[in-house]
Image (cartoon, grey):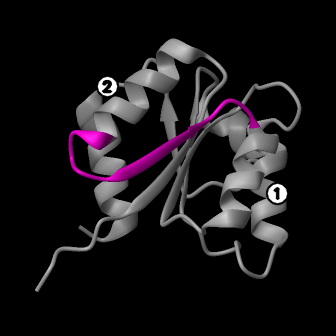
Amino acid sequence: MEKKRYRIIVVEDDKHVLNFLVNTLKQKEFMVEGAANGKEALEKINKVKPDLLVTDGIMPEINGFELCRILRAGESTKDIPIIFCSASEPTNLKEKGGKADIYLHKPLDADELYTAVDQLLGL
């Protein structure tokens, strides 16, 4: 039986952080696409529903908080697992309305990211 390749969308406006996240996840053979902001992410999500979303909080156009609210309100997107990455403390993120499943504090390291991804995908 062929192993499922999970599809992940990473939303991050800092190109260096985006490249780190995309390349780190690709090392584990996930299918990964990057988006520079929430608006771009929504366009990608509407084309193909990802198995997981990793998003930054502060971004231009649609920020990570609004992106989470939009996804949780959508019938076809409400169950997409979300990892929210920010330099803010997790308690502050929850108070601001972030509706993610896991909150990771920046700067991120690969092992912490892998653990969160594995937990949400049930690996």
- Residue type at tag 1: Arg
Q: Mark 2 and 1 residues: CB-CB less than 8 Å, in contact?
A: no
Seen from the viewer's position, the closer of residues 17 and 99 is: 17
Mark 1 Cα within 10 Å, few/some/many (few <14, many 20+)? some
User: Residue shown at 68%/65% (left/top)?
Assistant: 47
- Quadrant location of the C terminus? bottom left
Residue 60: tell me if it is visible: yes
- Tell me, yes or no, whether the highlighted magenta stretch contains residue 55: no
Which region shows up in magenta?
Answer: 26-37
Q: Is residue 106 visible?
A: no
Which type of secondary structure does the marked residue at label 1 adopt? helix
In the rendered image, residue 28 lying in the magenta stretch gets the answer: yes
How much space separates mark 2 and mark 1, taking CA atoms? 26 Å
Q: Residue furthest bottom?
A: 1
Q: Which residue is mark 2?
A: 109
Earlier sequence position, callout 2 versus callout 1: 1
Place of residue 65 in the rendered image (x, y in percent of width and height, measured from the top left): 79, 43
Of residues 112 and 39, which is closer to you in this image?
39
Farthest front residue in view = 47
Left/right of residue 120 with respect to residue 40 in the rendered view = left
Secondary structure at badge 2 equals loop
Where residue 91 sits in the image (x, y, percent)?
65, 38
Q: Is residue 55 left or right of residue 24?
A: right
Give the image quarter of residue 74: bottom right
Which residue is at a point 31% across and 25% down the rendered structure image? 109
For label 1, the residue is 69
Q: Is residue 3 left or right of residue 47?
A: left
Examine the rendered structure and indicate whether residue 51 appears above or below residue 14: below
118 and 6: which is toward the camera: 6
Q: Nearer the viewer, residue 101 or 91?
A: 101
